[in-house]
Amino acid sequence: MPSKRRLRWAAIPVATAAAVALAGCTPTELHGYLPGFELDGQAAEPTTNQVERVASLWTSSWIVLLAVGIITWGLMLWAMVVYRRRKGQTGLPVQLRYNMPIEIFFTTVPLILVLGLFAFTARDQSAIETQWDDPDVEITAIGKQWAWDFQYNGEAEDNSDAVWTMGIQAQPDADGNIDQSQLPTLVLPVDKQVTIHLQSRDVIHSFWIIDFLYKKDMYQGRDNTWSFTPTREGTYAGKCAELCGEYHSMMLFNVEVVSEAEYEDYLAELEAAGQTGDIDNAYDRLANAPGTTGAAPDTTDSEGEGH
C-alpha cells in the first residue's frame, strides 16, 4: 500500500507538468507543426473544411510511430544491457533457434499497424477526394512552365462566359526577393463549395496550396479535380510541388480567400477588362503531339511575334 500511495503522489506532478506543457502548445504544435491553424501567430479556424482531417491523420500516425519507436529502442537497449558479456565470460551467450511467442508477436503487431494505418488513410483520402455534384464555384487551374493560368468557369457549356487571368513566373530582384504583386493570384470565395479542375499545358506539375495541406498532380491531357470549401479569409502561398524544369522554384502563386461580394466584384473586373472566353487549350504546348486531336493553335500575331 505505501508503494502505491507513493506512485500516486509521483503521478500528480507528472500529470500537472504534462497538462501545463500541452496548454502552452500553439495550434500549430497541437496539429503536428502543420500550417493552416494559425493567423499572425494566433489560433484561428482551419483554412478549409479538410485540414482538420489531414492534420488528425498526420498527428495520429506520428504518435503511433513514436510509440513503436520507443518500444523498439527500449527492447534494443534492454537486450544490450541484460545480455551483455559479463566479466569472466567467454564465447557467445545461449543461442535460441525459435521462440514462437516472439515470432507471433513480431508478425502480428506490424501487420495490425500496417492494416490500421492503411484503413484510416483510405477512409480520409476517400472523404477528401469526394467531389461536389453541383459546386458553387468551378475553376480551371492550368500549370505551365513556369507560371499559372486561372479560368473561372461560367454556366455555359462551352465556357464562353468564363473569365480568366494568365500569369508569369516569379520575378526576383537583385537580392532574390520575389515581387508578390506580379505573382499569379487565385481568388476564392469564403464558405463556398469550390471545385478546381487541374490541367497542364506542357509537363507534369503539382498544384499545392501550402496552408490547405493538400496537393495534386497536373498532367497533360488528363483533368484532375479537387473539391473543398475555404473557411477562412486571407492570403495564402501556393507553388508547384513537382520538379518541372529549370525555373521550377519560380513557379509560385498566391491564393486570396475573400467574401462572396469581393469575389463577384473581381469576376466583374476581369469581364470588364475583356478577359473572357475559354482558354483551357489555347496555348497547350503539346496540342499537336501524337495521340491528340488537331494541330496546335496559331498563337502568333500579324508580325510573327509569339505570345
Image (spheres, rainbow, N blue to C red):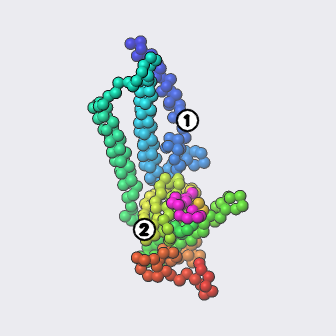
Percent across and percent down for residue 172 are: 67, 62
User: Which corner quadrant holds the N terminus?
Assistant: top left
Residue 138 located left or right of residue 272: left
Does 128 appear in magenta? Answer: no
Q: Quadrant of residue 306?
A: bottom right
Residue 43 located left or right of residue 55: right
> Could you tell me if residue 253 is visible in this image?
no
Q: Which residue is mark 1?
A: 24
Residue lying furthest right: 174
Counting labels gives: 2
As helix, strand or loop, the secondary structure at mark 1 comes to loop
Disc 2 or 1, which lies upstream in sequence? 1
| 268 or 64, nearer to the observer | 64
Residue lying furthest left: 100
Image point 46% across, 72% down: which residue? 154
Image point 43% across, 60% down: which residue? 227
> Could you tell me if residue 154 is visible in this image?
yes
